[in-house]
Image: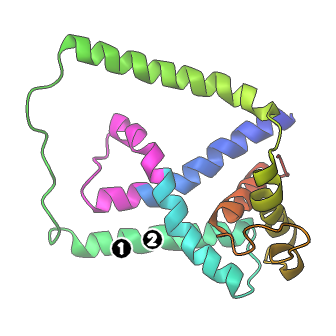
Amino acid sequence: MRDERLVVGLVVFHALAAVPGLVLLHALGLLRLRPLALLAAGGPAVLIGLALVGIPLIALVVLGVSVGAGVALAVAAVVTGVVALVSMRTRGHGPARPEASGASGTLAEVVVERVVLAGTALYLLIGARAFTNLETLWDDANIWSLKGLGLFHHGTLVDGLARNPALSGVHLDYPILQPLAEASFFHAIGTVDL
């Protein structure tokens, strides 16, 4: 049951992280609402979404607001709504959408493209199972995950944890976007999983 919950949480976390990024990419005219285009934009959309939602969450954490799953979802919804609203208000005033130029790929290019995509998908499916048993390395345990665990359990920055040289002599002022994303992921799967 735990592994299924982890996989579902992983999918939900990435899907929710991708939504603000997809909305922004569409607003900028870089994404058409077609299934393959949405799938292809998934990776960049997750990174964009993490940045778009992560910055306000960092501001809230620094201000002392407890950031749990509810606050993270609310911030994600507000950010997505603001991007969508700005997009609707400025539609037609932005740059023209780029049109594809040139002929579509040859049969060999299409075959190679599909083989690479299928291989990547297979790697991720097999890897998702294999990566669940990797050991936690020093940097992760002493910098990122330590702060991520503090954010997960306390919901806010704990000064004795985040800036204590006895716990980690390096990177006391390490940026907290990654630990915040890690804590949000732990909320998505319902438990800590290092």
Left or right: where 109 falls relative to 146: left
Q: Magenta stretch?
A: 22-45
Residue shown at the point (69%, 88%) measured from the top left: 63
Instruction: Give the SS element for disc 2.
Output: helix
Q: Position of residue 105 (x, y in %)?
A: 18, 22
Q: Secondary structure at mark 1?
A: helix
**Residue shown at the point (77%, 61%) measured from the top left:** 143
Is 126 included in the stretch rendered in magenta?
A: no
Residue at left offset 79%, top offset 66%: 147
Residue type at mark 1 is: Leu
116 or 35: which is nearer to us? 116
Rate crowding at label 1 as few (under 14), some (14 to 19) or many (20 or more) other CA atoms within 10 Å. Answer: few
Which labelled disc corresponds to residue 85? 1
Along the viewing direction, whichever of 123 and 186 lies nearer the viewer: 123
Q: Any magenta on residue 38?
A: yes
Q: Is residue 126 above or below residue 132?
A: above
Front one among 176 and 84 = 176
> Is 179 on the left-hand or right-hand side of 82?
right
Give the side of residue 129 with respect to residue 106, left or right: right
Residue positioned most to the left: 102
Q: Are marks 1 and 2 in contact (CB under 8 Å)?
A: yes
Magenta stretch, main secondary structure, is helix
Marks 1/2: CA–CA distance: 6 Å
Residue 57 in the image, given as x and y percentages of width and height = 62, 74
Badge number at residue 81: 2
Name the spot of residue 29 as percent of width and height, x first.
Answer: 24, 57
What coloring was used for the rendering?
rainbow
